[in-house]
Image: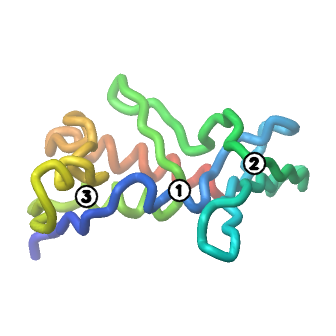
Amino acid sequence: MVERFQDDGSWIGDFSDEVLVVCPRCSGMATLTAVKDKDGRTAEHRRVCTSCGSTHTFGQVADYSLWLVTECKGNTLMALNERHLDYMESYVKAELREGNRDGSAVYRNKTVASRLPAWIKSAKNRDDVLKCIKRLRERIG
């Protein structure tokens, strides 16, 4: 059976509700989440470290390094969280990749799948990219 991927129109913001970052205190994995107000808008952000337990709440997003980053085929592969990894993995595994049929051409070019670099999309790199995704998944624990 042929693995299929259908672009569902997801954009990078769909994965940003919870971002795995490097804790500035202990260099362990921390989770950065957006805290919504009663109207559903982001009111503040909260960082919680799963290693040392430190927490910090702030208004504007601070400059944090992503936790899920690795070198792959001479390039940098990064993901925001496990859901983002799952999405990329399903894209890379697929032998048949179908684009997003909804919206204008401008919108279709802003989906996560449409914006992936050519080296990730290349079938010749499939096995290497999947190994790198597995390595990132192991960082989550």
Give the side of residue 80 with respect to residue 130, left or right.
Answer: right
Determine which residue is flagged by label 3. 91
Report helix, strand or loop for mark 3. Answer: helix
Report helix, strand or loop for mark 2. Answer: loop
Q: Nearer the viewer, residue 120 or 99?
A: 99
Amino acid type, label 3: Tyr
Which-is-in-front pick, marks 1 and 3?
Answer: 1
Q: Which mark is residue 59?
A: 2
Q: Residue at x 53, y 56 (%)?
A: 16
Q: Residue at x 40, y 52 (%)?
A: 12
Between marks 1 and 3, how big is the CA–CA gap? 19 Å
Which-is-in-front pick, marks 2 and 3?
Answer: 2
Give the side of residue 22 with respect to residue 78, left or right.
Answer: right
Label 1 vs 3, first from the N-terminus: 1
User: Residue 138's x, y, as percent?
Assistant: 57, 53
Label 2–label 3 contact, CB within 8 A: no
Determine which residue is flagged by label 1. 16
Report helix, strand or loop for mark 1. Answer: loop
Q: Nearer the viewer, residue 66 or 61?
A: 61
Between marks 2 and 1, how big is the CA–CA gap? 16 Å
Label 1–label 3 contact, CB within 8 A: no
Work out whether 78 lies above or below 4.
Answer: above
Amino acid type, label 2: Gly
Identify the image quadrant of residue 99: bottom left
Give the side of residue 58 with respect to residue 19, left or right.
Answer: right
Label 2 vs 1, first from the N-terminus: 1
Graded by Cα atoms within 10 Å as few (under 14), some (14 to 19) or many (20 or more), the crowding at tag 2 reads few
Say how many tags the image has.
3
